[in-house]
Image (spheres, rainbow, N blue to C red):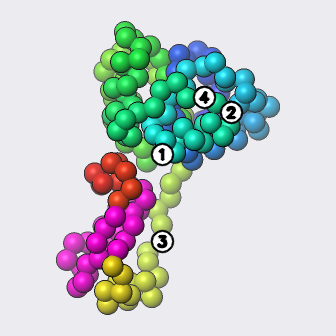
Amino acid sequence: ETAAAWLGAADFAWLVWTSPHGVDHALALLRQAGGDPVSLRGRRIASVGPSTSRALAAAGLPVTLEASPHDGASLGRALLAASPGPSSALLFRGNLATQDLPEILKQAGWAMREAVCYLTRPAPPPPPELARRLDQGEFSFIVLCSGSAARWLAAHFPPGRLPAAPRLARLGPATTRV
């Protein structure tokens, strides 16, 4: 899907990334197809946040627009503000990305294509040792770095399941909402 999207990339006003993983995977596919990320310099490039912007900069691609706060809805609003009137965007995303960004652009009449760059697969159930340690309250904190990690925790350790629930630290607004 991403490889095919590169064939029509020139038709879009904006190239939009919603994660560093998307940057890595999309650019790897571009290279496999014989392309060079340097050829994208001068294009309008949008990023959901600092980590994604750093990944793009490491590939030699300057970011035109970075969302703040760092989530899909904010990125959609920032794109609309940067391009009054209908425009177009090629979105490089993961399979579990929220629909906030594409919905905002669609409602504004933008031409858009989504390219799923990578797949997040469900993690296996927790090993018995981890479940035992959580049940015994051995952890003070659990750090959740993604929405998929938060969904995994909720599926395997629903509220009230743990006798001594550790505190949760969440990375970013999207993970917090899950």
Q: Are marks 2 and 3 in contact (CB under 8 Å)?
A: no
> x%, y% of residue 48?
45, 37
Span of residues in magenta: 141-169
Report how far apart the C-alphas of labels 2 and 3 lie in the structure. Answer: 36 Å
Q: Residues within 10 Å of mark 2 (few under 14, many from 20)?
A: some
Task: Give the residue pinned by disc 2.
Answer: 60
Quadrant containing the N terminus in the rendered view: top right
Q: Do the residues labelled 2 and 1 touch (CB within 8 Å)?
A: no
Residue 46 painted magenta: no
Secondary structure beneath label 1: loop
Q: Which is closer to the viewer, label 4 or label 3?
A: 4
Label 2 amino acid? Gly
Report how far apart the C-alphas of labels 2 and 1 lie in the structure. Answer: 25 Å
Q: Residues within 10 Å of mark 3 (few under 14, many from 20)?
A: few
Label 1 amino acid? Asn
Task: Give the residue pinned by disc 4.
Answer: 62
Q: Is residue 108 visible?
A: yes
> x%, y% of residue 4?
64, 30
Label 4 amino acid? Pro
